[in-house]
Image: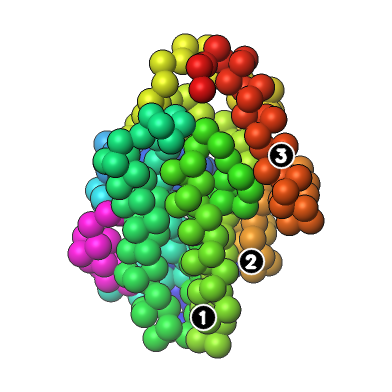
């Protein structure tokens, strides 16, 4: 183990990844292990997380699975403390766990809003609260919060999701400015479209509030050319190594971010037109 003087990139590092049993979290965990990082895969789907950890170990990597609900702060804090006690350090905290509840605002119940905020925003806050003090004492560490392109641009049809992801972007940028003097890095990950289970029905813990045939949803996402998760993880970790503040992968999605920053009214107009066309294509009554 390298001395506690600076962050390890990535050889010899310790990382915790929430939502690591599938999708983006799994891809990040596997790529971290390839780069000789010891990884803790934290997820509610413990059987699947253990299976991924076992495969990493068989391939020569170091991985451990833990059942975690990110909405429960004491459990997350305990996991961080136990990890540091066992490995002697915490280099990376990936607050990645998230859910999607798809539908228009008129389809939401208040419980849908509450669930999105609890997992997508408070789950990130819990991860920061559990790891930041430890990283400050070390004098190093890197917190990586998963937001979305929906956190950088208007996202009709996913308003609750976009609300939480905009909050994660703002949180991450503000904390990055504050934490720099303590030696702690903060990045926000804003994926475009990545080929994960979340594209079809919201994943294991999400849901669709609209009755849309899965094949129609699949065709819609395929038009946007989803990036394979393995390639996505490689590009993300390369950007993390460079301490990028906002990480957008695939990079072509930066165009939409720049356009929205340059002319927000145009961004809203284009989002509205895209939303109307999507509704027609899916045969949905708005």
- Report helix, strand or loop for mark 1: helix
Residue 122 percent location from the top left of the image = 34, 58
Residue 221 percent location from the top left of the image = 61, 25
Q: Residues within 10 Å of mark 3 (few under 14, many from 20)?
A: few
- Residue 53 picture quarter: top left
Identify the residue position indicated by label 1 in the image.
179
State the extent of the magenta-drawn residues as a range: 70-84
Asked if residue 41 can be seen in this view, the reply is: no
Residue at x 32% of width, y 70% of height:
130
Real-space Cα distance between discs 1 and 3? Answer: 36 Å
Vertical placement of residue 187 versus 22, above or below: below
Q: Residues within 10 Å of mark 2 (few under 14, many from 20)?
A: some
Asked if residue 122 can be seen in this view, the reply is: yes
> Is residue 115 on the magenta stretch?
no
**237 and 100: which one is in front?**
100
- Report helix, strand or loop for mark 2: loop
- Report helix, strand or loop for mark 3: helix
Real-space Cα distance between discs 2 and 3? Answer: 28 Å
Residue at x 36% of width, y 34% of height:
108
Residue 283 percent location from the top left of the image = 55, 12
**91 and 168: which one is in front?**
168
Residue at x 44% of width, y 63% of height:
93
Q: Is residue 91 left or right of residue 266?
A: left
Identify the residue position indicated by label 3 in the image.
269
Identify the residue position indicated by label 2 in the image.
245
Residue at x 53% of width, y 55% of height:
166
């Amino acid at each position: 183990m390298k001395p506690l003087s600076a962050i390890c990139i990535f050889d010899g590092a310790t990382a915790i990844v929430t939502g690591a049993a599938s999708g983006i979290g799994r891809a990040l965990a596997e790529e971290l292990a390839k780069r000789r990082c010891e990884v803790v895969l934290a997820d509610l789907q413990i059987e699947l997380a253990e299976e991924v950890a076992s495969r990493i170990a068989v391939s020569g990597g170091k991985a451990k699975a833990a059942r975690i609900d990110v909405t429960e702060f004491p459990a997350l804090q305990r996991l961080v403390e136990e990890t540091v006690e066992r490995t002697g350090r915490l280099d990376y905290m990936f607050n990645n766990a998230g859910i999607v509840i798809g539908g228009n605002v008129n389809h939401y119940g208040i419980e849908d809003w509450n669930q999105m905020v609890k997992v997508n925003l408070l789950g990130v806050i819990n991860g920061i609260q559990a790891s930041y003090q430890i990283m400050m004492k070390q004098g190093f560490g890197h917190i990586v919060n998963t937001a979305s392109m929906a956190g950088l641009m208007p996202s009709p049809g996913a308003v609750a999701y976009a609300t939480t992801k905009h909050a994660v972007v703002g949180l991450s940028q503000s904390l990055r400015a504050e934490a720099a003097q303590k030696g702690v890095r903060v990045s926000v990950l804003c994926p475009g479209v990545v080929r994960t289970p979340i594209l079809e029905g919201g994943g294991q813990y999400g849901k669709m509030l609209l009755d849309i045939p899965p094949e129609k949803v699949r065709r819609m996402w395929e038009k946007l050319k989803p990036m394979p998760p393995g390639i996505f993880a490689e590009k993300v970790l390369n950007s993390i190594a460079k301490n990028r503040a906002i990480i957008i992968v695939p990079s072509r999605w930066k165009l939409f971010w720049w356009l929205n920053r340059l002319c927000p009214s145009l961004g809203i107009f284009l989002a509205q037109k895209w939303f109307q066309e999507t509704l027609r294509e899916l045969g949905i009554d708005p």
